[in-house]
Amino acid sequence: MPRVPNTAHDAMPLPALQAGAGVPQDLGRVDLGIGFALAAAAVFVRFGNLHEILTVMVGAKLYLLYLFVLPALLAVVLTGGLRRVFEGRPAIYWTGFALWIALAIPFSTWRGGSVETFIGYLKTGVAMMVVIAGMTTNWRQCKGMMWAFALAGGVSLAAGRLFETTKAGGRLGLDFGSIANANDFAAHLLSLLPFLLWIVLSSRSFVLRTLALPGIGFGLYLILRTASRGAVLALAVGCLFFLWRATLRQRIAFLALAPVALAAVAAFVPRDALLRMRMLSAAADVAGKSADDGVALEAAGSASVRRYLFQKGVEYALEHPLFGVGPGLFATYEGTHEQVFGTHGYWRVAHNSFTEVASECGIPGLLFFVAGILSTLRLLNSTYREARGRPECQDIRTAALCVMLGVVNFCVAAAFLSDGYSAYFPAMGGLAIAIARAAKQEFQSRAIPSGAAQLPVGAGGRFAWGPLGSAPT
């Protein structure tokens, strides 16, 4: 794919690009556009779950994800992209987490199962981080990568309509795939909807904004239909985070739409889903419920089991503080070492990504995991703060805000899921590295000349400047 220069930094001499972005010297000889296209396609396929959808539709495994990920990884290596990947601390921490998983395998209670977990994490989490951070080299490509996530969100919304099924208690889920569970599907949408919000806030196209805004509304409807209490809490935290970081105009628009959203929830979300979401604690009055009130009883029972699993996760982490019971083995260890039902336990996963990692990989593994999340947020926040003070860089501010929102949403949801080895956090870390690197280039190339006046020319944070008193372009 030919590379079309469209920003000021494209015209900068190669030494300046090297200093600012770590772009290799053979940039003129290697077409990074092909590698980026492969990386963006891999993101679209992975987070849109197209490989799973096509497998079901065709009836055979197509290995579609490998078709894009493997060539993208090769492009990273050939173009010197590994150096670009490790410019940011998130890559260091997520790689450290992967290495600690490998170190924990010899001490695992079942090495075969832990090896499978490690390989799965390399193929999903680490691979996605490397191709995103390694092949996204400028701001134009950062926007292209965000479009890949947004389109993946669109496919996920379509899947929620086309492949929906009713789970226990009337909860919405999918017929198949890694996010078929109602809680997993809700968390997946929470991580991707902010990219649709990015289109609403930054696109100059009325048509695109008109398409993206209803998509967000439909996504929220699907999330609430899952009746996932963790997702509702994540949604509340995400709303508060947005109000904290958004501009005054964006806050006013949000508060104006809030009553409409609440009215829609009351009108369209099933009563059973609303009832379940209200029961956030097992302390609900279960004894007072009738035998027919299955939703309330199921919700209270689920909360009780989750509390037990949380306690066991903390207990196992303290009993095995260095390497844990083995990556991916919480359910096996709990099932064989506890006696909840006669001679065995629940045989369930931890249902908390943080206690999952702590109990399976030890305290050092948890430290790497938390450091990866915090470094991602810190890198994005640093970019956000720098762009906020530059009127000509409001598009960068908006992008950083929306990615941060996705990370915050998924971080809260992950406290109720076993997603310690998923691709979401490392992928967001790779995107944070790419955005921070590209933003530095843009801050330099968009710097307002001395003696110039800033004049707004339209929505989306785009400005032009010229001699004092000149008309906007």
Image (spheres, helix red, strand yellow):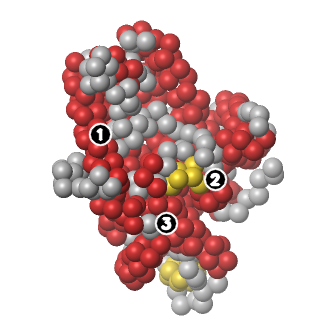
Q: Residue at x 56, y 39 (%)?
A: 178
Q: Residue at x 38, y 12 (%)?
A: 109
Give the percent coordinates (x, y) of residue 174: 57, 49
Give the percent coordinates (x, y) of residue 271: 39, 66
Residue type, label 3: Tyr
Query: Tags 3 and 1 in contact by the CB under 8 Å rule?
Result: no
| Whether residue 444 is visible | no
Farthest residue in the top direction? 106
Residue 306 disc label = 1
Q: State the residue in front, 61 or 23.
A: 61
| Whether residue 298 is visible | yes
Marks 2 and 3, how far apart in space? 15 Å
Is residue 190 depicted above or below 433 in this figure?
below
Q: Give the left or right position of residue 267, taking residue 46 as reference.
A: left
Which residue has dot 2 on it? 163
Q: Residue at x 34, y 28 (%)?
A: 346
Marks 1 and 2, how far apart in space? 28 Å
Q: Residues within 10 Å of mark 2 (few under 14, many from 20)?
A: some
Q: Residues within 10 Å of mark 1 (few under 14, many from 20)?
A: many
Give the percent coordinates (x, y) of residue 33: 74, 47
Query: Tags 2 and 3 in contact by the CB under 8 Å rule?
Result: no
Residue type, label 2: Phe
Q: How many marks?
A: 3
Residue 221 disc label = 3
N-term-proximal mark, 3 vs 1: 3
Is residue 99 depicted above or below 231 in this figure?
above
Q: Residues within 10 Å of mark 3 (few under 14, many from 20)?
A: some
